[in-house]
Image (tube, grey):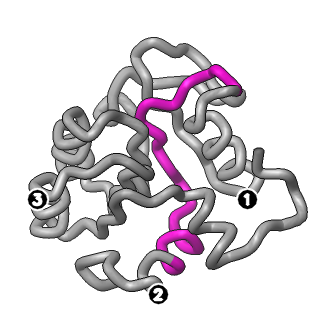
Amino acid sequence: MTNQASSQEDIARLLRECRTIAVVGLSSNPARPSYRVARYMQQQGKTVIPVNPRESDVLGEPAYPSLSAVPGSIDLVNVFRRSEEAGAVVDEAIRIQAKAVWLQEGVVDEAAARRARQAGLLVVMDRCWLKEHVRWIGQTGRDPA
């Protein structure tokens, strides 16, 4: 993989290859975008790891208070936090040696993205994982909503 997820090919590759995805800010509320996106990820065969200190269990998976508390390796850190909170999550993703970070639609932190790229992580910013998956990989006939 290249050092940046700047091309559509890189995005499609991340969508295909990342199997273990930590979703930071994942809510147990089915009305929240994080819940809908994470459920769709599970429907696509991905292992979803909820990271939210206010949750104990989401989508049948135990929730962790931080990325550092997650056992095992993480392919992709998907960030559902406000832009001003994203930098701390990205820095933690770098510390745990995740392979990539994905800042959801509306989440932008250029400085954090630079730090992640310099550390060798692939970065996608201000894009929805579900929308990109549908665009590049396609649905499996299941309702993502």
Q: Earlier in the sequence, mark 2 or mark 3?
A: 2
Image location (x, y in percent) of residue 76: 42, 56
Q: Residues within 10 Å of mark 3 (few under 14, many from 20)?
A: some
Query: In terms of secondary structure, where does tag 1 sit?
Result: loop
Give the quadrant of residue 121: bottom left
Mark 1 and mark 2 lie on one chain; the one further toward the N terminus is 2
Tell me if residue 23 is in the magenta stretch.
yes
Q: How many marks?
A: 3
Residue stretch rendered in magenta on the structure: 12-30
- Which amino acid lies under the numbered mark 3 shown in the image of this protein? Arg
Circle 1 or circle 2, nearest the eye:
2
Question: 115 or 71: which is nearer to us?
Answer: 115
Which residue is found at the position 26% from the left and 77% from the top? 4
Residue 21's x, y, as percent? 50, 50
| Residue that numbered label 1 is attached to | 44
Does the rendering let one see residue 102?
Answer: yes
Q: Which mark is residue 9?
A: 2
Identify the residue shown where x is 67% and y is 27%.
31
State the image coordinates of residue 71 (x, y, percent, origin top left): 42, 37
Q: Is residue 33 above or below residue 21?
A: above
Callout 2, which amino acid?
Glu
Q: Is residue 73 visible?
A: no
Q: Residues within 10 Å of mark 2 (few under 14, many from 20)?
A: few
Secondary structure under tag 2 reads helix
Res. 35 image quadrant: top right
Spatial distance from mark 2 to mark 3, Cα to Cα? 22 Å
Relative to 61, residue 78 above or below: below
Residue at 68% x, 76% y is 137
Residue at the spot of label 3:
115
Quarter of the picture containing the N terminus is bottom left
Category of crowding for the residue at label 1, using alpha-carbon neighbours closer than 10 angstroms: few (below 14), some (14–19), many (at least 20): some
